[in-house]
Image (cartoon, grey):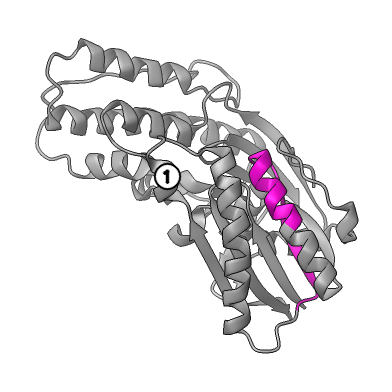
Amino acid sequence: MKILGIESTCDESGIALIEFKNNKINVISNLLASQVKIHRKYGGVVPHLAAREHKKNLPYLFKKLKKEVKNLEFDFIAFSQGPGLAPALLEGKKFTQKLAKKYNVKILPVNHLLAHIFISLLREDKIENPKLPAVSLLISGGHTELFLIEGNLEKNFKIKFLGETLDDAVGECFDKVARMIGFPYPGGPEIEKLAKSFKGKFIYNIKLPRPLLWQKSFNFSFSGLKTAVLYKIKKTKKITKRFKVELAVEFQNAVFEVLLDRVKRAINLFGAKTLIVGGGVSANEMLKEYFYKNIKNIDIFWPKKTLATDNALMIAIASIFYLRKNKKLILPENLDIDPNLKINL
């Protein structure tokens, strides 16, 4: 079975082709066109510009795929239905419909967030079947959510929502803090780079809050942390390189502690045997190191850094789990998008 995956939820245009046979994954192609340079001068993603680039990039990527693969064929198209930016999703939808009609195949709409979870299970040429129950942490620029997965991922499983951010997503908070100290979008990698450069002793002794640690819930909040950073900057007379480094260290520590607290609370309460982490923020190597150091005696699935951010391979992989749940393929004219799509599988 060959699956064509298409991604267009935000600022990454992606097309991937995989073959799934005898529980083995053969990644034939995984193409991506990034829009980071275009959106950087605006400090974040501009929806109508993202849509314009998808309209241009998706046909270009498919043309490139046809050059790579002789006698191109696929059984169906796995399409990223949402959540995401409505204009961007619409361009992906129109391209998918056109392609499905041309190749006379049906479409399988996929939840973009679920795809971030499932791509973490890809190991070499197969999809792992982790021990359940599993706690899944989704951390990205637009989402911070916690889920419980029960059952068996190869047969019958259920995904339960546990908690989410009450305001800013963790990735959004990284970007905004980076902007406060003069770094361009995307800011997450810049914050991590600063924190990695820390050496010696602390000079400024910056202390930031750990939002909601006192609450016995699975929700997150990062707006107050962002505001606390802003106040620290305003009260500091001279913003030196050293100040930025120490601020980055303390900011990351605050975020890491909050994420770990919620995850460990869920693991202990539900007796989870596995942790699955997904989303763009999981590309942070210091976060990965922190979690592996502080979580013991359970399996941890973390995506490859190259697959942490949006891509079409994760959409194709996720469609396999949809088929296991007996989700039906649809005709091109029945395809819909949902910018606020909730996980329901």
Please state if 303 lies on the left or on the right of 194 as rendered: right
Q: Which stretch is magenta?
A: 74-94
Would you say residue 154 is visible in this rendering? Answer: no
User: Which residue is drawn at the image coordinates 61% and 36% (left, top)?
Assistant: 146
- The quarter of the picture where the N terminus appears is bottom right
Residue 281 included in the magenta stretch of the image: no
Residue 223 at what x, y percent from top left? 47, 19
Please state if 130 lies on the left or on the right of 169 as rendered: right
Residue 234 at what x, y percent from top left? 24, 13
Would you say residue 173 is visible in this rendering? Answer: yes
User: Which residue is drawn at the image coordinates 84% and 52% (left, top)?
Assistant: 335
User: Which residue is drawn at the image coordinates 63% and 52% (left, top)?
Assistant: 8
Residue assigned mark 1: 291
Q: Amino acid at mark 1?
A: Phe
Residue 228 at what x, y percent from top left? 35, 15
Q: Is 329 drawn above or below residue 249 in the view shown?
A: below
Callout 1 environment at 10 Å: few (<14), some (14 to 19), or many (20+)?
some
Q: Quadrant of residue 54?
A: bottom right
User: Which residue is drawn at the image coordinates 65% and 54% (left, top)?
Assistant: 115
Residue 87 included in the magenta stretch of the image: yes
Please state which of residues 288 and 229 is positioned toward the viewer in this rendering: 229
Disc 1, SS: helix
Please state if 36 lies on the left or on the right of 165 as rendered: left
Please state which of residues 172 and 281 is positioned toward the viewer in this rendering: 172
